[in-house]
Image (tube, rainbow, N blue to C red):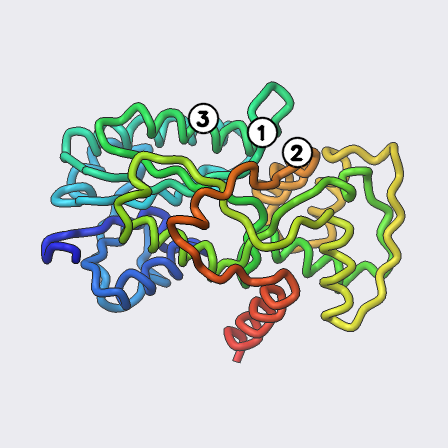
């Protein structure tokens, strides 16, 4: 049973995941404060609104006042490709300092799956660095590591959808054989909300993924079948992830600041190496085809 003054902060609250998580927490009866940098468009009714910027430390004082638990869902890629690692690092350091002074008890952070080491993409390396910075805070950090998130409005989902719908024949690099463990957005929200409700997750790191491990080629082919399209995918050894990221930028509406780091990260296998969270939070995981159909339905509903 949560205490009545258990106030939750959602950073990145106008983003793809932040909006869904805010709605879920409000429905669960939490007092939710949404942190936004600019206009409040997309913030659900019933949430408290505060304007603050991770790169402006003075603005974080009001945002974190009285907060018990904060969800850290921000990243700097949306502000442009150049320097996003530095901005991510600075934002996390500012947050740690401000949250420590405010007496925040817990932070729940959603980052990326991927092995450690020198061969990580810039995107995955930055996500891991942010986790390490947060873990140095006075608060307890829960770190969830996810691969591709399947949901309407998500950058990875939108890239795959556009490629499948616009290119019946694809000449692609060898990264299409890289394995991935995609997860439905509803399952991610269940895990985030579940971690908040279950103190056994406090201060721990968990891999989260869907019930299937697929290659990127298998994901695109199955997506195509759901959309009624037969794809011809031709892997070639000379097309590097960096070159293919420029190609994806021409074909899809996803901004290059988002698409390029994501594509360059496809060289890294992103598969759960441990499944401890399934014992603590035994949710029903959504199969890939079902997750895609739900995302397409949600996208159609948003357009009507």
The residues bearing labels 1 and 3 have C-alpha atoms spaced at a distance of 13 Å
Marks 1 & 2, CB-CB < 8 Å contact: yes
Residue indicated by mark 3: 129
- How far across and how far down the image is residue 203, in percent? 31, 34
Q: Residue furthest front?
A: 279
Q: Earlier in the sequence, mark 1 or mark 2?
A: 1
The residue carrying mark 2 is 268
SS assignment at label 3: helix
Q: From the viewer's perspective, tell me whether residue 273 is left or right of residue 29.
A: right
| Residue 72, horizontal then vertical, whole percent | 35, 42
Quadrant assignment, res 162: bottom right
Residue 223, given in percent of the width and then of the height, sits at 72, 63
C-alpha gap between disc 1 and disc 2:
8 Å
Q: CA distance from mark 3 to mark 2?
A: 16 Å
Name the residue at 27% across, 29% down: 96
Reply above or below: 137 against 3: above
Residue to which mark 1 is pinned: 115
Q: Residue at x 34, y 55 (%)?
A: 193
Say which quadrant the N terminus sits in: bottom left
């Amino acid at each position: 049973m949560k205490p009545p003054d258990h106030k939750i902060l959602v950073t990145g609250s106008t983003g793809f995941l932040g909006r869904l998580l805010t709605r879920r927490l409000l429905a669960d009866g939490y007092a939710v404060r949404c942190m936004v940098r600019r206009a409040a468009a997309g913030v659900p009714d019933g949430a408290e609104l505060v304007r603050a910027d991770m790169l402006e430390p003075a603005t974080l004082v009001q945002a974190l006042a009285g907060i018990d638990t904060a969800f850290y869902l921000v990243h700097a890629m949306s502000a442009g490709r150049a320097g996003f690692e530095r901005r991510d690092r600075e934002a996390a350091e500012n947050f740690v300092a401000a949250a420590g002074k405010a007496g925040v008890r817990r932070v729940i952070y959603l980052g990326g799956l991927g092995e450690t080491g020198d061969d990580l993409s810039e995107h995955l390396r930055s996500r891991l660095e942010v986790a390490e910075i947060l873990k140095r805070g006075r608060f307890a950090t829960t770190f969830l590591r996810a691969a591709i998130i399947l949901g309407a409005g998500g950058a990875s989902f939108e890239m795959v959808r556009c490629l499948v719908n616009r290119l019946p024949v694809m000449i692609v690099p060898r990264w299409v054989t890289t394995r991935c463990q995609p997860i439905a957005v509803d399952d991610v929200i269940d895990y985030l909300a579940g971690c908040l409700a279950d103190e056994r997750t406090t201060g721990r790191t968990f891999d989260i993924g869907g019930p299937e491990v697929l290659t990127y080629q298998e994901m695109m082919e199955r997506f195509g079948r759901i959309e009624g399209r037969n794809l011809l995918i031709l892997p070639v050894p000379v097309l590097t992830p960096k070159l293919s990221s420029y190609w994806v930028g021409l074909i899809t509406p996803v901004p290059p600041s988002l698409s390029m780091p994501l594509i360059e990260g496809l060289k890294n296998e992103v598969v759960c190496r441990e499944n401890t969270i399934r014992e603590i939070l035994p949710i029903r995981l959504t199969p890939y085809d079902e997750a895609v159909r739900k995302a397409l339905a949600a996208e159609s509903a948003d357009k009507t």
